[in-house]
Image (cartoon, rainbow, N blue to C red):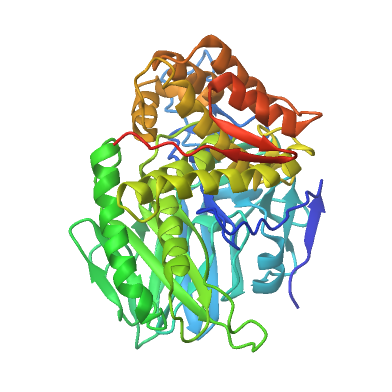
Amino acid sequence: MKQNIKTHMRFKVESHNQPETSGQEEHKSLRLPRWLIRAVVFSAVTLWGNCFIASQPPAVSSTQKTIQAPADPRVRGLVTITHVASDNWRFTYDLSRDARSIFLGPKTEKYHAASWELPDGFYILVEGPYSYLERRDGKPFRQVAIDVTSYRQIVPYAPQPFGLFDQGTAVNTGPLGFAARVGEARMMMSFLPKYSFVGLPDETVLVPGKKRGMVTEIDLPSQGLFVYFGKLQGLYETDRTQSILDTRFPSTLRKPYLSAVKAYASFYDRRLPHSAPEKLVIMVSYQVDNDPLVANRLLSLGGNAQHFQIMAKARGPQTLTADRQDIQKMQRFFAHEMAHIWQTSLGRDNARWFNEGEAEMLALYALEHHGHITHVEVAQNLSARVPQCVESLRRTSLLEAHRRGEPQANYTAGALVIASALSAISADGTQEDITALDRALQTRPISERRKQPLEAFQATLKQLGAEPKAVDAIGTFIRVHHDDPFAAVRLLFDSTGLAYSVDGTTLTIEPVRNAR
């Protein structure tokens, strides 16, 4: 019997099938918020406040002769992932200390309900946009074993738990725990167990960044990794990238894919050199549409980026002709996800408008730079976002969009904010490109970027020559829940100098060549 999920404060999540955007074409893409994935040594995170709180050492009696070292507040131990059969897994937790709750990240109710079979005493608690593994009686625990079934579908706006290939399966360790609560208070401690991986007798276990064959008690990045179980067919490597392509991946897309990711990696390396110098690992699964009603549908893609790794799930017909539209869609998707790897970190889950909006603009700029789209198509792409932007902002502010069930606004309105910012910083006669904006933002103090992301962004715009009126307009557009979103978009463009025309309720952004 599959486990029940208890839900508090349920939020609505809608699809956002917008054919001309890169990060969310018939799928939901996510960059893990850096507040979730950054290793926090001897610290704690209060989830509702989205702020890190230094954990305090226990009080020492004045009568003690020696000073005691503070207890390690981190939750360690061992998590073992065992491949039991083709689509069957066992996730075993053996923690170093009692924990009352393990924070699993963004809520994924359908996935947990369909794939996780929990022991009778455990359940998945959903509060707001997040989910937690807990005992029903609220008591602490150290050990639990969960039987899990592989999950093929796209999980919207969350890390993908699985990637299913023709010759193997990738398992994401990230959604197995980002933090843990040890006391009755809502303070969450760092969750830093080691991981062991047990494959089937005839399969290879590949842990990216580790030596081949290293599978026992491994330290992994706190945001997790996709670990591959299976046969290593479809492995392609360059100096900068390592790709595992499903054997079902259309041959018509293979060459365009390999040339695109190589070009974008080189481009981002040159323009955004502050990224960590690790080899980018990309895993691409492909699901064949066998339903005759959808057999002729266009290619769709989904997935997420985390710690120099991308998990992509592609879906389409068994025989894909791969016209320019398919190739361009694929190029936009990977340019967007790769942009997440290189872009500047901003905020703690409260700057998704920047994370997704800038990734969209970086992707468009990368495609234009390599001649994969024209500057006219960039303007058309941005113009196509306006109707969905307006619709989403009728229900929420952009700042609160992901908490109010409108995450697609981060891709639509977020991209329009970045486009407006680029126009604003060109007002002094020096046209700045999107990578110049990102590099300038990188120079702001880390604490400012984490704790005051919008203020850091506005300060960067001023630094690059934007007028105060434009900077204030951008802040207002992001913060305010507008009564008339269409008028708010026009005011944003007017204040920042972004050229556009209006025909009734249709707004068209004028083409502008990006600085090279």
Is residue 256 visible to us here? yes
- Where is residue 188 shown, x and y percent of the image? 60, 39
Q: Taking 264 as reference, is 497 above or below it?
A: above
Say which residue appears at 40% left-offset and 25% top-offset: 441
- Where is residue 34 shown, x and y percent of the image? 48, 39
Work out whether residue 243 or residue 397 is closer to the camera in this orientation and state it. 397
Q: Going by the picture, which residue comes out furthest to the top?
A: 468
Quadrant of the image for the C terminus?
Answer: top left
Say which residue appears at 43% left-offset and 40% top-offset: 39
Q: Taking 409 as reference, is 481 above or below it?
A: above
- In the image, 1: left or right of 85? right
Residue 199 lies in what quarter of the image? bottom left
Say which residue appears at 32% left-offset and 68% top-offset: 256
Number of numbered discs present? 0
Is residue 57 visible to us here? no
Residue 464 lies in what quarter of the image? top left
Q: Going by the picture, which residue comes out furthest to the left?
A: 239
Work out whether residue 79 or residue 52 is closer to the camera in this orientation and state it. 52
- Where is residue 12 shown, x and y percent of the image? 78, 51
Work out whether residue 285 or residue 38 is closer to the camera in this orientation and state it. 285
- In the image, 442: left or right of 381? left
Work out whether residue 128 or residue 380 is closer to the camera in this orientation and state it. 380
- Where is residue 291 shown, x and y percent of the image? 64, 87
Quadrant of the image for the N terminus?
Answer: bottom right
